Amino acid sequence: MTKLTRRGFLKASTATAAVATLGTLSYQDWQKQAYASEGEADAEVQISSSTCNACSNKCGLEVFTKNGKLWKIKGSNIHPNSLGTLCARGHGFATNAYNDARLTSPLKKNEDGTFSEISWEQAYQEIGEKVKKIIAEDGPQALAITQDPRPSGKFYSKRFMNAFGSQNVYTHHAACNLSKLTAYAHTIKKEPKCDFNNADAVMFIGRSFGDGIKPSAMKNLANNVKRGLHIIMVDPRFNATAHMAKDWLAIRPGTDLALILAMSNVLVTEELYDKDFIENYTTGFDEFAEAVKDYTPEWAAEITTLPASKIKEVAEFMAEKAPKAFIEPSWRAAFGCSYYNSTETARATILFNALLGCYGKKGGMYYGDGVKFGKLEGPKFKKLPEPVAPQYGSDRFPLTPTGSGSSVVVAEGIEKGDIKGLFYYQSNPVIGYTNAEDFGKRLDMADLVVVIDVQMSETAMHAHYVLPDTTYIERMEVPSSTGTVADVRLQGIPKVHENTRPVDQIFTELAEACGIGEYFTFTVQDVIDAQIAPFPDEVKEKLLKEGIAKVPVENPKKPDGDPHFPNDDNKIHFADDVWLEGGLGRNIQWIEPKYMPNPDNIDEFRLIAGKQSIHSHTMTTNIPHLIQITKDYDLDRVWINTKRAEALGIKEGDKIEISSEVSTTPAIAHVTERLHPDCIWTASHYGTKSPYLTEGAGLGISSMDHTPFHMEPFSGSNMSQENLVHVKKMEA
Amino acid sequence: MNNANDLNLSRSEVFHTLAAFWLKPEQESYIEITSLESLYHFINLISETYHISVDSLDFLKSFPTFEEHAKNYEQLFSLSFGKLAAPLVESVYKKWTENPEINTPQAHQTGYVKGDSYSYMKALLHQLEIELPDEYQADELPIILDVYALLIEYAPVSSIKNLSENHLDWLDELSSRLARVVTKRGFGEFYLDFLALTQSLVELEHRLYLP
């Protein structure tokens, strides 16, 4: 290779001059050729399979490329979560691979708070040294990792931390559904699936398929409503699914427990419960009946602001439709994580469903089949060491499943000096899990914070090191499954940035640097091969080639009247001493929310939050197309009830000030009758604070700005809707 | 300048030097191009070739030190810093593709890498049998400027014009973004000035040498 001019830095061949002399390919000619070759019907198309990363549904998708360029994506026809469709998030999120705001190099924080690019070698070396120092001084129990569940991330994060001997592996569940998981863990162990296709009545409590969208679920629900399924929507807000409901119960937020206790009271008092089911599959019913005897509809009416007659009516209706009726297990809102009484509320729904006798019944809830993956055995998968200590926070929250843990209590651990080194994989707790300012301050106290992500999130801003992951569409991942469909993310497009690395490589190399490389002597392919080993050959072949395959089941489970609870004795214990360990009662009881707005204060509200179908928490707020929809439809406005707005002189579009004990933020008002008067509502996706991600800058508020740093004492959830705010109109 | 060939060599050298400046910082070459001797040569070359007054190029005498330049460059131009930077990558400032057959959300939007600009520059480099350094994308400004310099020396006017009109036509957008970044960051005025010089020279190329 010769340089052709004195200062030219590009290395060229001696032929370059000759070629240049003849004239180079014009841009217009190139376009014609490239577009023609891409547009021809028989143009070579690469199709790869993956699962969407825009939310935890992981809908199957097909990635089409031509000439190495992303051509289109569509929902997989056979994946149960997509069934041929993909939501706006799925389409938008795939474009992140090319976004100019992606991390493209490892970064290290400087003393002045700015970041500088460093090499991977330097990053690994320094992180390794710091980790070893922490272990030497405080033991592996001073390390923790939090990850948002995606196939490879979940697998590698857990193995990485466990390889140190640390049990401190956490999920985002403290900000999602930890209260519910805790309730299930100590009743029937695991949540069954809902048989919408045969149900007659479903009560949704704070859950909207149309907002926290899974395309196939929404389609299925709509088809069943057409069939005659009766939906009862219990939500302070008329959400994006409520139009399909026959009843909208605009409940005072935080009081869902009172509603369920009263409904239970009706079924017990009027003997409308399923006596056979109670006899055969439960214990402690008499204690339960005694416990709920005073929770009348009239009592609940005071608390919930729902008419007593309505409470009675829906309870009787559900009983009439039983066992083809159930309260849907929900996700976040009412009993996922939001209130002081969320765990108790979740427990109450499980017991109410038992009164309906819907477990194990057609049209009710039952356990379906899943995929049984092969074990990771053999010399490549060295047995992990025994943990040196229990999971941090498990003594404080003994009821909380350690598979989730409370990622919020970890922040407390930093302040106490118990947790010194933290890793975050694809999770953004600073803005999503609890009060942003508070969490950020605590992170700044840690000796080491490493964030692995694709963009400079609010959490990354508090990191010592930021490592750039590839996007999901650029890599292969370990298998996962939905029902009996197994899937493997195959690489969809060529890697966009040379200096990014896929999650499996990052953790493998980090492990080496931290002295635990012996536990990572395998590749992603090795994991895939081991996990699909039990499948029939044709299934394995399909999976490796197409990324998705149905795994045959010998005796498929069907609802046969037996609930087949995966707990010890196939029974629900209405009364149980296990709850005493966590500070709850042996029997179900009313627990007030931590905060309750004073109705005499005209400017006092509870701030609640929910989802929008075009966004996933804060992951999508830097995707221009999705944010444009927000802007076009003013989706960042804060909802306020019409009458309350009138009393405060607030009109649609007015600028308002929202203040609380922790923050004061401006917002724009959306005045509506579709909201309970006790609360104001915001979508949970806004109020972004990272200066590196500007698409969503200045839009909306984050509800977490007004929620103090606290935890539900029974499960460690973040109590995301336990707050009090004051609202006033801002002068122009 | 004695003849057309000498003129082309001068033009080529100017653009090679521009390219060298916009490269990711490398100490040896940076010190070479910013040495007093090189600077005076560069200023005189620009003045003679493009008829710009020497006084208007005074700002070139205050090149940052290599250490300052390395730090500034990273902070102002690295893709890792999202909207707090102004990457020197053509695709970011243009529609990702003009191909009407592609309908992915980013297809006809700006703000994305590895678009048509990148694909074309890759094809051009391949045609010219030029090896691209690993750490660069094909549509980065220094690459385009260096190829432009090469074409001035060897290629017909049509090729030079094609590259300039189609791949040096995003510098206004780059300048706007850089101006916002410089304001936010509180440093980087020198790079705004150097970019303005680059833009002027591109424009003068058209006016004087690309009819």
Image (cartoon, rainbow, N blue to C red):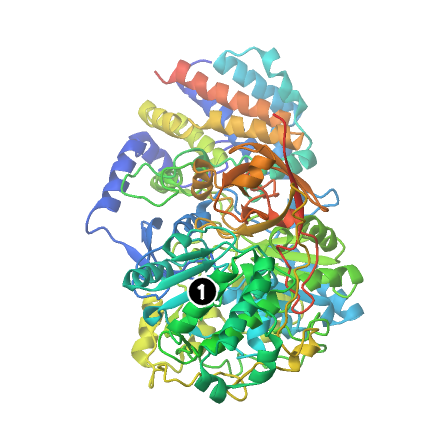
Q: Who is closer to the viewer here, A212 or A65?
A: A212
Q: Position of residue B5 (x, y in %)?
A: 41, 20
Q: Mark 1 lies on which chain?
A: A
Indicate left or right for A50 with A290 as reference. left
Q: Can residue B138 be seen in this view?
A: no
Q: Mark 1 points at which residue?
A: A313
Q: Who is closer to the viewer here, A72 or A115?
A: A72
Secondary structure found at label 1: helix
Q: Position of residue A578 (x, y in %)?
A: 65, 81
Image point 54% across, 14% down: which residue?
A: B47
Indicate left or right for A592 with A362 as reference. right
Q: Who is closer to the viewer here, B10 or B110?
A: B110
The relative height of residue A490 versus residue A654 in the rendered view (above or below) is below
Q: Can residue B201 be seen in this view?
A: yes
Image point 71% across, 70% down: which residue?
A: A393
Q: Who is closer to the viewer here, A264 or B206?
A: A264
Residue A555: image quadrant is bottom left
Q: Where is residue A163 in the image (x, y as percent from the top left)?
A: 63, 74
